[in-house]
Image (cartoon, helix red, strand yellow):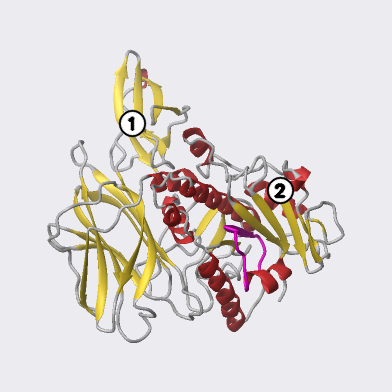
């Protein structure tokens, strides 16, 4: 197998911290920088030298003591060394991941591997103590059988050791292994020359997410860094007392995907949960963190129905106490019964005619030594009518995703369903899953103040642009309001001159 990397290098420090929510994240949190999280970086050779894979500590602003270098010739904590050579590609990847201008600037340790050695002796065996592995390389052209073998090695390791493998999907053409693995995160480049899904083997939705970069080598470490931040936050209790669940790779994956911001042309279907170009959307670590901080919330009721039967809402009382949060739980099914966990939400707001946007992501692992997955689905029902509002029902993905705008106020049932039966859909009796959810309604408050107008709206969720127009006729044109937004008291604040005449305003996610 060939280990491929981009031979193009970019100037260190090109991270767009605003675009991925990092600026807002850093402004609203304290000391979340990757501390206590051990990570790894696997690199393919560049410039014709298969051992040109090493990060130069000084170029990324980190001490030599942070690194251990591994190749087939051995390991060392020294740099330079006789095991390998510096890689400009590795330096740039590192700068986005954990460099002093990167996402997770204070990780506990970095294990820097040559990719072939990593896969042959580590990924298929053990990556104990390493929580996030960045893989800005791919295997090149593989047969479907070869891809499936690679996927199995990574999935088994991820499931056994709770290690999150974050991999670039490639820079054009089909999605490449190891980004095709079930339990990892495949990353595309937003506004870059990125590959598109689905996977060649069985049409799974990849990428999982994108970040702004020219190539996937540099979008991938942004997601790796964001994963390290969420894991640190979970381990220190920001998501509640169940720190083991909060830092599980399934929870981290669900939160990262659920916090992503949708581009204007984002699209999916019930049978394929993510966009073939953008996955769940553009990385936004602030949104993901706020959902983590919303806390763990269990289902309100659990029921079962005969396999394939309707499963409308039950009459159970009680609601999930937060519109933003997560859960880490199990669901069960049998040869004759589907299992359903019900999460009830009573969506209300003080403003009249309020509508909500709902984003919900379900993630679970392909279990060790399994070729198939348990089949889980995600449904949203309206309670008073019993009508199905939205569903994500992929038969091949271990991710389900619902995104819906303009949802009227009311009571809703978000269901996690585990399919039963004797073939295909049920591998084991129970399955552990992570669920991330956000029901949001962002009110725009407009207050006259002398010759000015003050417009405010909540900082969470982020990713919105304030737009204005002078008329609401059928040919209306909306324009971005190009005035600095100031954050104060968890509100975005814009001050406009009121002498410009009648104006209408809205918030739009790009």
Q: Earlier in the sequence, mark 2 or mark 1?
A: 2
- Quadrant of the snapshot with the N terminus: bottom right
For image coordinates 60% across by 61% down, the residue present is: 168
Res. 409 visible in picture = yes
Dot 2, how many residues are within 10 Å of its Cα: few (below 14), some (14-19), or many (20+)? some
Residue furthest to the top: 450
Mark 1 Cα shell of 10 Å, populated few (<14), some (14-19), many (≥20): some
Residue 393 can be seen, yes or no = no
Q: Residue at x 28, y 80 (%)?
A: 334
Q: Position of residue 369 (x, y in %)?
A: 51, 79
Q: Which residue is mark 2?
A: 66
Q: Secondary structure at mark 2?
A: helix
Which SS class for mark 1? Answer: loop
Q: Is residue 154 left or right of 374 when viewed as pictured?
A: right
Residue 377 against residue 290 in the figure, above or below: below
The x and y percentages for residue 269 are: 37, 66
Q: Residue furthest bottom?
A: 422
Residue at numbered disc 1:
470
Q: Quadrant of residue 338?
A: bottom left
326 left or right of 280 in image: left
The numbered disc on residue 97 is none
């Amino acid at each position: 197998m060939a280990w491929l990397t981009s031979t193009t290098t970019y100037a260190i420090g090109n991270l767009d911290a605003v675009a991925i929510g990092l600026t807002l994240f850093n402004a609203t949190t304290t000391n979340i920088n990757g501390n206590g999280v051990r990570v790894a970086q696997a690199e393919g050779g560049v410039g014709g030298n298969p051992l040109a894979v090493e990060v130069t500590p000084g170029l990324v602003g980190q001490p030599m003591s942070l690194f251990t270098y591994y190749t087939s010739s051995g390991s060392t904590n020294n740099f330079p060394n006789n095991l390998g050579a510096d890689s400009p590609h590795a330096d740039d990847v590192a700068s986005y991941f954990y460099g002093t201008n990167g996402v997770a600037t204070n990780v506990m340790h970095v294990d820097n591997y040559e990719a072939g050695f990593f896969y042959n002796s580590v990924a298929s065996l053990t990556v104990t103590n390493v929580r996030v592995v960045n893989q800005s390389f791919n295997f090149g052209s593989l047969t479907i059988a070869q891809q499936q073998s690679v996927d199995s090695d990574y999935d088994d390791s991820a499931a056994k050791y709770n290690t999150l493998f974050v991999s670039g999907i490639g820079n054009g053409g089909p999605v490449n292994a190891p980004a095709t693995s079930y339990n990892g995160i495949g990353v595309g480049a937003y506004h870059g020359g990125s590959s598109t899904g689905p996977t060649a083997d069985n049409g799974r939705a990849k990428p999982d997410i994108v970040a702004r970069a020219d190539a996937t080598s540099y979008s991938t470490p942004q997601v790796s860094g964001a994963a390290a931040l969420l894991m640190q936050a979970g381990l220190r209790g920001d998501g509640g007392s169940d720190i083991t669940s909060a830092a599980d790779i399934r929870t981290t994956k669900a939160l990262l995907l659920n916090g992503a911001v949708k581009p204007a042309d984002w699209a999916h279907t019930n049978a394929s949960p993510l966009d073939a170009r953008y996955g769940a959307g553009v990385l936004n670590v602030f949104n993901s963190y706020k959902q983590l901080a919303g806390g763990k919330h269990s289902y309100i009721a659990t029921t079962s129905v005969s396999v394939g039967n309707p499963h409308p809402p039950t009459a159970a009382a009680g609601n999930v106490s937060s519109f933003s949060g997560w859960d880490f739980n199990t669901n069960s099914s049998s040869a004759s019964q589907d299992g359903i966990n019900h999460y009830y939400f009573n969506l209300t707001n003080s403003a009249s005619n309020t509508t909500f946007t709902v984003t919900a992501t379900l993630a679970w692992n392909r279990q060790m030594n399994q070729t198939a997955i348990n089949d889980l689905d995600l449904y949203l029902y309206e309670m008073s009518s019993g009508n199905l509002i939205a569903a994500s029902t992929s038969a091949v993905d271990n991710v389900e995703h619902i995104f819906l705008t303009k949802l009227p106020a009311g009571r809703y049932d978000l269901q996690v369903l585990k399919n039963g039966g004797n073939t295909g859909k049920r591998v084991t009796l129970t399955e552990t899953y992570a669920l991330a959810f956000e029901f949001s309604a962002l009110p725009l408050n407009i207050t006259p103040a002398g010759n000015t107008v003050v417009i405010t709206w909540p900082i969470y969720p982020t990713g919105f642009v304030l737009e204005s127009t002078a008329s609401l006729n059928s040919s209306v044109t909306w324009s971005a309001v190009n005035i600095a937004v100031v954050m104060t008291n968890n509100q975005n604040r814009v001050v406009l001159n009121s002498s410009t005449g009648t104006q209408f305003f809205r918030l739009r996610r790009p």
